Amino acid sequence: MNYAILRTHKLHTLQQIIHTALHNTRHRHTDHTDPNRKHLNRVLLGSEDIAADLMSFYKNKGIETFRKNGVLAVEMVLAFSPSWIKTPNNEYLQDANVKVKSWVKTCLSWARQRFGDNVLSCVYHGDESSPHLHILLAVSYRDEKRSRWRLSADRFFGSKAKLSQLQTDHAKAVEHLGLSRGVEGSKAKHQTLKAFYRQLNKAEQISTKHDLPLPGKTPESFASWERHIEEMAAENQAEIAEREELYRAEIAYWKSLYANSIGQPVQSLGHRVTNR
């Protein structure tokens, strides 16, 4: 099953927005990117100065004061299961390029239809193991009672029900491409890319130190590597248990032989068998 993936992240400060822009436009070093694929990255909507675009957008709507700790913008990341465009050997399918182009066009069209002019920036990343889109959303809406524009992230993303519906609507928009929604109401936890790469780096160091197979660089291949290591550990534990049983049997034999030779029971030798 190939899944449509959608994640959201609220941005509360201008500094967070600037950091997001530096990452999205690759003006800041990003781990686990392929320099040979950097040319595939695209700014599809907006400029590279996302923070300036956002402030200008709000100013044009008459919004120039912001609530402390309020949400200034929301970043939405759209992606898909790697297996949609790759073989189990991590090689790209022949129609991968066509698939990705259709997916990008569909996703951007859906975002504009749903969020209107609040869609300020859309950046495509093709230099990482899994292609994805970063879409920056303003959180403005028209307050007709007061005849002015206001900010409210809760209006769009303020409850589990709204976020769940967002997932569903996005999945429906791309289902004709062969992508499906994840299990609704699933308790599975999302792991951020930063946390995943931290875990990946640690696993690579341990694997190199102990001469183990290196983990894959995608969440799916990493999970496969984890299962393989768990199987190796289980086999090793079984081997240790079998070896301990042999040691115990051998000790019991020699204790019995010694007891028979002197005609009396043998007290515990007081030694503990350790694995070597």
Image (cartoon, grey):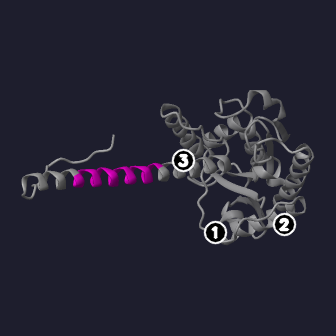
Query: Regarding mark 3 in the picture, which secondary structure is present there?
Result: helix
Is residue 252 on the magenta stretch?
yes
How far separated are the C-alphas under marks 1 and 2? 18 Å
Front residue of 223 and 106: 223
Closer to the eye: label 1 or 2: 1
Mark 2 lies on residue: 172
Query: Regarding mark 2 in the picture, which secondary structure is present there?
Result: helix
Mark 1 lies on residue: 186
Residues tagged 1 and 2 counted as in contact (Cβ below 8 A): no
Question: Label 1 sits on what residue type?
Answer: Ser
How far separated are the C-alphas under marks 2 and 3? 37 Å
List x then y, in percent, for residue 215: 61, 41
Closer to the eye: label 1 or 3: 3
Q: Which sits earlier in the primary sequence, circle 1 or circle 2?
A: 2
Question: Label 2 sits on what residue type?
Answer: Lys
Instruction: Give the label on residue 229, or none.
Output: 3
From which residue to which does the magenta span run? 236-253
